[in-house]
Amino acid sequence: MAEITNEMILQAIKELAEQLKNHEEETNQRFEQMDQRFEQMDQRFEQTNHQLTEINERLSQVEQKIVQMDKQLTDVANGQKILVEELFENKKEIKRVKNVLNIY
């Protein structure tokens, strides 16, 4: 009877060992899947980071162009101001010449 009990205990231990081995394999597979998912996520983050870097570079270029355009518009406005002042001075001079000619 003791032999039967020992055999039953040994069989139960073998079954538990097999279950533990199966569980360990399943756990390892799950960790491998998780590792693959994390690698995919890392790749996606790298792609997103690369895209954001490109967008930042483009925005920087746009900002530089806007600064250049602002400077050009300022130059145009200053030029127009000078032209208006000279036109005003020319009109004053023409009026003065007309007045002088009307006197004579």
Image (cartoon, grey):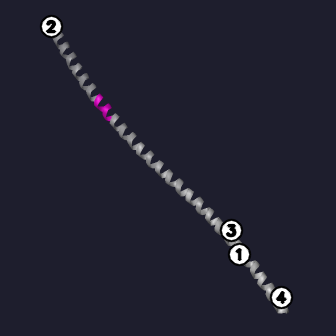
Q: Which residue is mark 1?
A: 84
Mark 2 vs 1, N-terminal side = 2
Q: Which residues are magenta?
A: 27-33
Mark 2 vs 4, N-terminal side = 2
How far across and down, in percent of the image, does residue 56 sit?
A: 50, 51
Mark 1 vs 4, N-terminal side = 1
Find out whether residue 4 is within the magenta segment: no
The kind of residue tagged 4 is Val
Q: Nearer the viewer, mark 2 or mark 1?
A: 1
- Residue 81 or residue 25, whichever sits in front: 81
Q: Quadrant of the N terminus?
A: top left
| Label 4 Cα crowd, 10 Å radius (few <14 / some 14-19 / many 20+) | few
Badge 1 vs badge 4, beta-carbon distance below 8 Å: no
User: As drawn, is 104 to the left or to the right of 5?
Assistant: right
Q: Quadrant of the C terminus?
A: bottom right
Q: Which residue is mark 3?
A: 78
Find out whether residue 28 is within the magenta segment: yes
How far across and down, in percent of the image, does residue 21 sit?
A: 24, 23
Q: Nearer the viewer, mark 1 or mark 4?
A: 4
Mark 4 vs 3, N-terminal side = 3
- By secondary structure, the bulk of the magenta-drawn segment is best described as helix
Mark 3 vs 1, N-terminal side = 3
Q: Residue at x 20, y 17 (%)?
A: 14
Q: Which mark is residue 3?
A: 2
The kind of residue tagged 3 is Asn
| Label 2 Cα crowd, 10 Å radius (few <14 / some 14-19 / many 20+) | few
Q: CA distance from mark 2 to mark 4?
A: 143 Å
Mark 3 vs 2, N-terminal side = 2
Q: Which residue is mark 4?
A: 100
User: As drawn, is 57 to the left or to the right of 9?
Assistant: right
Could you tell me which secondary element the residue under label 1 belongs to?
A: helix
